[in-house]
Image: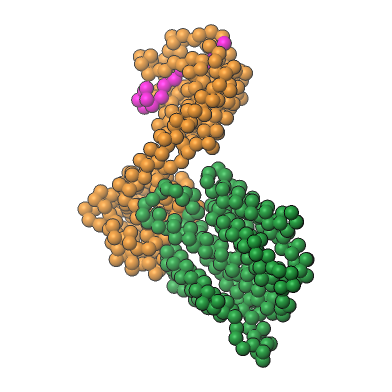
Amino acid sequence: MSVNETGLSLGILLAVLASICGFRPEWQKWVIVAMTGVSLALSAVLVLQGMDDGKCPSVNPMGMPLYWVWSLSCLYLLVGRDYRMSRLGIWSAPLVVIGILISWLFPPASGEMETVSFWVHGYYSFGIIALGAFGLSFVATLLGAVQTRRLKRHRLNGAIGGLPPIRSLDRVLRQLVFVGFCFLVPALVSLGIEIWVSSAQVVEFPAYWVANCTLFVLVGFLLLVAKFRGLSSKNFHWSLLTVFSIWIILIFLGK
Amino acid sequence: MSIQCIGLNFRTAGIDVREKLAFSSVSVGNDALVLREQLGCNGVVILSTCNRTELYFSSDFQLESQDFEAFLEKKSGAKLNWKSFLEYRHGEDACQHLFRVVSGLESMVLGETEIFGQVKNAYSKALESGATDGILNKLFQTAFRVGKKVRTETEITHGATSVGSVAVELAERIFGDLKQTRVLILGAGEMSRVTAQSLKSRGASGIFVANRSHDRAIKLAEEMGGKAVKFSEWIDYLIDIDIVIASTASPHHVVSRAEIEAIRKKRKYRSLFMIDIALPRDIAPDCAEIDEVYLYDLDTLQELANEGRVRRQREVEQCERIITNMMIDCGEVCFLK
């Protein structure tokens, strides 16, 4: 087993452990520890991949899922320090496992990597971190929607226990969406410069560039509405889920 | 040498008897020392809470009931038929009883955790005053291990069991930390006072009280460390409020959906937890249809409290299994007759 594979195995093992910690309340304090381990293992793998390829892993087509789950696990460390919010890790860990498995099962063929410009590089790097924040906010949105529904329907007990409080989820969710939005700004600025620089050659832009621009506009609009008009937790959750769905549809339509 | 326990609790004696035998938490260590000297035993620990007073002894001889009764009469200053209130336990039975007490299985609210601290406090006071011996030290150390094990390995402490604690649990599920939450009490009744007290004990700041009789509102506000507001003005305060507790004696709804809808925008659609413990209800049920409103009435709260009690009851068997295993582990202490 190579060093890369060892790192990925460790990442999967720790992410699975983080999920298992959700089964008993007294284990939940270990979620943050397991996710810190995931983050460190993935950092090591990404550094090694980057050194092998001589390029940032963000521009490696099959390294992207790994870079994405790495950014997700790092952002989780920022919000999961609070005990109540640490439970977010229980539900984000499965996404991390999927991301790692995808990049492990479909590694890039050697020589497949094309040379990209500095601006495309910037677009990928910032864009994927933004998507990490949106990925985590997607998990928080689902948890918030479930928790709101349960409390509205007077269901305290049940199979899904130990969800974070609605207000904490809401605060973290808005912070994550804002962070994602902030990272989308330099990503799209880089994209704009790239388009401007290569305007002579470019005939058609990839669909995911269009999808990301749409995501930027919709998320920006949502943040403005939430800030100045105010939005109930339920409306914020559903609006965000709609925005993410539109983004995914645009990505798939482009394919 | 044997371990013995004598005491009374909420099951065997009413509050009028229990209060006569209550020991001050300050002097409980010295009282244990005095009792040890008086009875000539090796060690004494006195556990005195609002629901029980129990004396744990280790001695080389069997203590007789009349030995205690003289002491109890002197302590309480009352000549009662103590035999009818007291429970005597020896050896294994006494050890098992202590393990059950420390685990919350003998508490009025099954699984409550406060008793653990109270037993710990009683033991440390007796230890400080030199009233314990090696056997009692070992017994109590084991009891604390049992208490911890029961709490961590079972769900005996999970789930709220009273209206007040359900309200607190719900508030924590909505707001997380209650330190920044503001509470509005509509109607200065006993139930709202108890519920607000539970929320305050968990850090709720800013308590506002509105009542048709403003004097009663002022009285309750003073008691809760809050502010009394005129009943006609409570809606203005609702803009900054997170939790509403309604328990007026009004025959019709005091809070309507239209009133909440009117201030939603000003509240920026923040979550509002509404507890309606009035009969007839004070808050119109259709308020629950507003997205950010979480409305719970008395029936729902009581139902949730019952669920909590049933849930805890289901855990008793598992707790008893832990206690039995620990009894075997500490056999050298427990099985001394």
Query: Residue at 21% of width from left, 53% of height from top?
Result: B251
Outermost residue, left side:
B251
Q: Is residue A70 visible?
A: no
Residue B125 x/y as whole percent: 57, 26
State the residue at coordinates (44%, 57%). A146
B194 inside magenta stretch? no
Residue A109 lies, in percent from the top left, at 71, 69
A77 left or right, relative to B104: right
- Considering only vertical position in the picture, is B336 above or below B211? above
Could you say which is closer to the camera, residue B67 or residue B79? B67
> Which quadrant of the structure image shows residue B198?
top left
Q: In the image, residue A154 lies at what x, y percent?
A: 37, 52
Q: Quadrant of the N terminus of chain B?
A: top right
Above or below, B114 against A156 in this view is: above
* Residue B123 percent across, percent down from the top left: 56, 26
Q: Which chain is green?
A: A
Chain part drawn in magenta: B1-16
* Camera-nearest residue between B67 and B336: B336
Query: Which chain is depicted orange?
Result: B
